[in-house]
Amino acid sequence: IVTLPALSLLAAAAFWLDARRQRRRKRERSTGVVFGSVLATGILFAIVIRATFALAQALSPSLEGASGAVNYAIPFAAGPIVVSLVAGMGPALLVALVFAIGAGVLMGLSFPFALFAVVGSLAGIYGLGKVRSRSVLLSMGGIVAAGNLVAIVAIHFLAAGPWGADFLYDALAGVAGGLTVSMVVALLLPVFEHLFSVVTDIRLLELSNQNL
């Protein structure tokens, strides 16, 4: 649980130094928001991911053949997506890399899970381009689920299978993971908006729709 906050602190420091060196465009977030959101996201989502990992491990014995698949339902992409909304694309991409490394470490230095986490995160960040309201987070969850499936197919292909029931269980868990990401983001995004006094694109669109 310490790995992700530590890596997130390094990511936040890197963006803080970068913001001090050069002038940002007016629409970009302030240095304090970037640093704070990256660090807070690292700490909070490290706890969320560790808790869901513990839950997955507790459920594994009762799932028999699908015991390993439940790890694909862990919402690794939620943190980078929240950072993208609050601090911007650049910090989100770095956080996605940090969380991918953390996922690999959490799963016992597993490259497949690092790949899974980064593909899902990038899919979610891309899905934010379709944002029109808070309800579209469900669509974004579908995009994350699609990214998860692509990653799972790649993992099974690189491992030369199996393609039977194990693949089906992994695929179903990956889809569930995408939907879990959308729920976690929808639940925690208002907290970050309030905490950093940030009006995200989703909130702006909601306000504009109310004025129509």
Image (tube, rainbow, N blue to C red):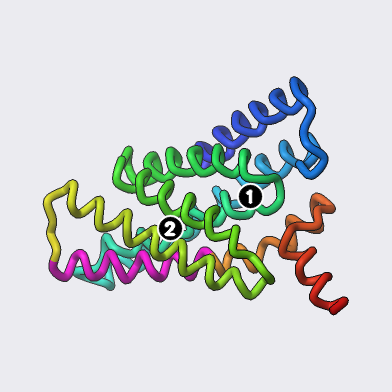
Q: Is residue 165 visible?
A: yes
For label 1, the residue is 84
Lateral position of residue 124 relative to residue 207, left or right: left
Lateral position of residue 49 relative to residue 32, left or right: left
Q: Callout 2: helix, strand or loop?
A: helix
Q: Is residue 178 magenta?
A: yes
**What secondary structure prevails in the magenta region?**
helix
Q: Callout 1: helix, strand or loop?
A: helix
Kindly identify the residue that appears in the image at 74 percent across and 60 percent down. Answer: 191
Whether the residues at callouts 1 and 2 have beta carbons within 8 Å, the answer is no
Q: Start and end of the magenta stretch?
A: 164-181
Q: Amino acid at mark 2?
A: Ala
Percent coordinates x, y for residue 82 in the rendering: 63, 54
Mark nearest the camera among 1 and 2 is 1
Q: Earlier in the sequence, mark 1 or mark 2?
A: 2
Furthest toward the top, the residue is 21
Q: Is residue 173 above or below residue 21?
A: below
Question: Residue 70 appears in which quarter of the rendering?
Answer: bottom left
Q: What is the C-alpha distance between the residues marked 1 and 2? A: 27 Å
Kindly identify the residue that appears in the image at 63 percent across and 75 percent down. Answer: 135
Q: Is residue 48 visible?
A: no
Nearer the observer, 157 or 187: 157
Lateral position of residue 38 relative to residue 59, left or right: right
For label 2, the residue is 54
Q: Amino acid at mark 1?
A: Ser
Q: Is residue 36 above or below residue 124?
A: above
Kindly identify the residue that appears in the image at 83 percent across and 70 percent down. Answer: 207
